[in-house]
Amino acid sequence: MISIQSKWRYLFMFLGIQLVVMALLSREGYQKRVSYFIRIFRKPDTTGLSGRNHTAAGIAGGDVYANLSHLSKTHSQGDEMPYCPKTSPLIGGPIHVSFPSGLTTAQVQRKNPLVVRGGRYRPPDCEARHRTAIIIPHRHREHHLKFLLYYLHPFLQRQQLNYGIYVIHQAGNYTFNRAKLMNVGFREAMKEEDWDCLFFHDVDLIPEDDRNTYVCDSNPKHAAIAMDKFGYKLPYKMYFGGVSALSPLHYLKMNGFPNNYWGWGGEDDDIGIRVTLGGMYITRPSVKVGRYKMIKHKLDKGNGVNPKRFNMLAKTRQTWRSDGMNTAEYETISRQYLPLYTNITVNIGTEAGLHPPPPLPPAKAAVEKTDQVPSKATAKPSAKLKEGRTEKMSAPRDR
Ligand code: UD2
Ligand code: MN
C-alpha cells in the first residue's frame, strides 16, 4: 500500500515534470499558443480589428495600426529631412487579420490621416528610401478592396515607404483580364512618378507580416509565397500568382505581362516563365514572413476558367516578345484621385480588339452565319468610350 507521504512525493514529481515540459514548450515558441488560450477567457475585442490575436495557422498577430498614432501631419522642412533608417523602427512582425462586416471606407480614411489624395503617402519625419506603387486589378470587388486598404495603408506606413495605390478597374462586362490590367497599371503609374518598384497585387490578399517589405529585389520577387489557401506553403516551384514585385527595368526586360489571357488562370504561370525568358530569376521572402490571408470568394461572373490556358502556356517562348507591354492597347475612361487610392477605369476591349462590333441580333446572326471574321478597322467606338485616349505602349525590342 502507498503511504500518504509517498502520494505527495508522486504528486510533486508529476508537477515538476509538468513545469519542465511547460518551460521547454515556451522556449520552442509555444508561449504564443499558451497566451492564446489565456486570451480566450478574456473579454473579446468588440471592433474585432485591434489588439493582438490569432491568425489561421496559429501565429499571434498585432494590431496593424499600432506604432502609427504618434506620427504627426507636419512634414519636417524639405531638404533637411534625414533618410529613413534602413530598417524601419515601426515594423512589428505578425499582423492580426480579420474581416468584420461593419467596416466602412470612412473608418479606413479616419484611421489614415496622413494619406493624401490619390492614396499617396510619404513618411512625415524622414526621407523614404524607396518609392513603391501598388497596382490592383479590379472589377466588382469593392468589399475586398475596403479590407485591403484597411490593412495595406498602415502596413506600408510601418515600412516608411513613399507609396501610391492604383486600382485598375476594367470597364464593361466582357471577360476579365488580370494580366492586361497590370500592363495598364504599370504604364499609368509610371506616368505619374518615377516609381522604383511596382507591386502587382490581388485585391483579396492581405499580408500578415510587415517584415515582408514592399521593396524590390535585384530580381523579380514573388511576395505571396505562403497563403492560407495553400496551407501557408508554396504550391509549386514556379508559382508567381497573387502578389509580385518588379522594378521598371525587370518589367521592360520581360516585355511586361501577356495581354491575351482572358478569364481565370494561366497568366500567372506565363508571367513566371517570362521572368526566366527575360534572363532573370524569381526571388522570395521566407515562408515565415511572406504570409497572406485570402478573403474567401467564389469564381466571379465574367471570369470563367480560360480553357485555352495550357495551349497558350506551351507557346510563351514564341509569343512573349510580340505580346506584352509593347502591344497593350487600351483607352483610359477616367482617372479619379480618391482619398485612399487612384482609380483608373479602362476599356481593354476583347480578343477582337478595342472596339469589337456589337453582337448581331439573333435573327440576323442566323442569316449571316458565315465564317466572316470581325474587322477591327470597321468597328466604331461606342459613345461612352470615345472620350478616352488610346494608349499603345512601347518597350525596347532589343534587350
Ligand atoms: C489565383 C491567383 C491570382 C491569379 C488567378 C488566376 C492566388 C492567391 N491568386 O487567384 O493571382 O493568378 O488565380 O487568374 O492564388 N479580379 C477582380 N474581379 C473579377 C475577377 C478578378 O477584381 O471579377 C481580380 C482581383 O484582384 C482578384 C484577382 O483578379 O484578386 C485574381 O482573381 P481571383 O481572385 O478570382 O482568382 P484566384 O483567387 O483563384
Ligand atoms: Mn482570389
Image (cartoon, rainbow, N blue to C red):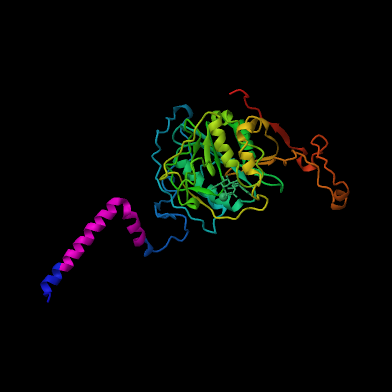
Between 164 and 288, the residue placed more toward the observer is 288
Q: Position of residue 202 (x, y in %)?
A: 56, 45
Q: Position of residue 376 (x, y in %)?
A: 79, 36
257 with respect to 122 (left or right): right
Q: Position of residue 395 (x, y in %)?
A: 63, 27
- Residue 51 occupies quadrant: bottom left
Between 263 and 126, the residue placed more toward the observer is 263
Between 69 and 342, the residue placed more toward the observer is 342
179 with respect to 90 (left or right): right
Residue 343 appears in the figure: no
Between 171 and 29, the residue placed more toward the observer is 29
Q: How many marks?
A: 0
Q: Main secondary structure of the magenta part?
A: helix
In this view, 242 is above or below 100: above
Magenta segment boundaries in residue numbering:
10-38
Residue 99 appears in the figure: yes
Q: Quadrant of the C terminus?
A: top right
Q: Does the segment drawn in magenta span residue 302?
A: no
Q: Does the segment drawn in magenta span residue 19?
A: yes
In this view, 333 is above or below 21: above
Q: Residue at x 52, y 58 (%)?
A: 100
Q: Residue at x 66, y 37 (%)?
A: 259
- The residue lying furthest to the top in this view is 398
Q: Quadrant of the N terminus?
A: bottom left
- Residue 169 occupies quadrant: top right
